[in-house]
Each structure stands twice: as C-alpha cells, then as structure tokens.
Amino acid sequence: MVQRLVFRRRLSYNTKSNRRRIVRTPGGRLVYQYLKKPKKVPRCGMCKERLRGILPARSFEKSRICYRKKTVKRAYGGVLCHKCVKEKIVRAFLIEEQKIVVKVLKAQQGGAPKPKPKK
C-alpha cells in the first residue's frame, strides 16, 4: 500500500511559493520537502548582462549578506556593468567637448553675443 503524504504547511495549492518534492527519509518514510525559489543573478540596467562580483540571492537573504558581496566599488557599482559605465563616461565627456566647441565657434564668428531687443 502507498504511504499517504501530509502537508507540513497549511497552504495546499500548487503555487510558486508552495513548490514541494517528495523525499524519502533515512527512516523510510515519504515526506514533502518544500523548495526555495531560485536565486536570480542581478543584471545590468542598460544591456541586461549579468553583473559580475555580486552574489545572487533572494531579497530576504540580502539583508543577511555583507555589503561587499552585494555591490562593486565603482561608479554605478551593482547597477551597471563595467562596459556600460565606460560608455556612459565617454559619452558624457564627448557631450561636454561638443559644448565647448560650440562656444568657441560662436565666439569666433560673432565676437561678443548681441543682446536681444525687448518688445
């Protein structure tokens, strides 16, 4: 005869948070073993690539993990990957350079900028 299995928790529905596996104990009994949800690896906000150096964990586990395993000591560490940070810095530099070039060209063409007449 097949041994009956009894839920250890009250929730009987087959939800994502209530996944279980049948396991045989050393005493020969069959019991339900509740499974944890899989951990997700954090991803880059721009390119969606996996972030290196950060421990994958569920949100409730992160409070128990030390700070150095949750982040990277860099600008945008733990949010963007190294490639996207480099790209962002270069883009910002080029935009600033372009602004300076525009200012210089305006100064060369018209001398001092003329004030606009008021209506």
Image (cartoon, rainbow, N blue to C red):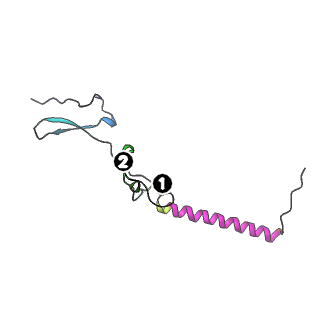
Residue 109 screen position, x and y as percent? 81, 70
* Quadrant occupied by the N terminus: top left
Residue 90 screen position, x and y as percent? 57, 65
> Which residues fall within the magenta stretch?
84-109
Query: Nearer the N terminus, badge 2 or badge 1?
Result: 2
Q: Which mark is residue 89?
A: none
Front one among 103 and 71 = 71
Q: Which mark is residue 64?
A: 2
Residue 15 screen position, x and y as percent? 33, 34
Q: Is residue 1 left or right of residue 96?
A: left
Q: Residues within 10 Å of mark 2 (few under 14, many from 20)?
A: few
Structural distance between the alpha carbons of marks 2 and 1: 20 Å
**What amino acid type is highlighted by mark number 1?**
Val
- Which residue does the image show at 10% across and 37% down from the upper left? 28
- Which residue does the image show at 83% across and 64% down from the upper left? 113
Q: Main SS type for the magenta part? A: helix
Callout 2 secondary element: loop
- Nearest to the eye among marks 2 and 1: give it: 2
Q: Tell whether position 100 is magenta.
A: yes
Q: Tell whether position 116 is magenta.
A: no
**What amino acid type is highlighted by mark number 2?**
Arg
Residue 94 screen position, x and y as percent? 62, 66
Q: How many marks?
A: 2
Front one among 104 and 27 = 27
Q: Which residue is mark 1?
A: 79
Q: Is residue 28 left or right of residue 65?
A: left
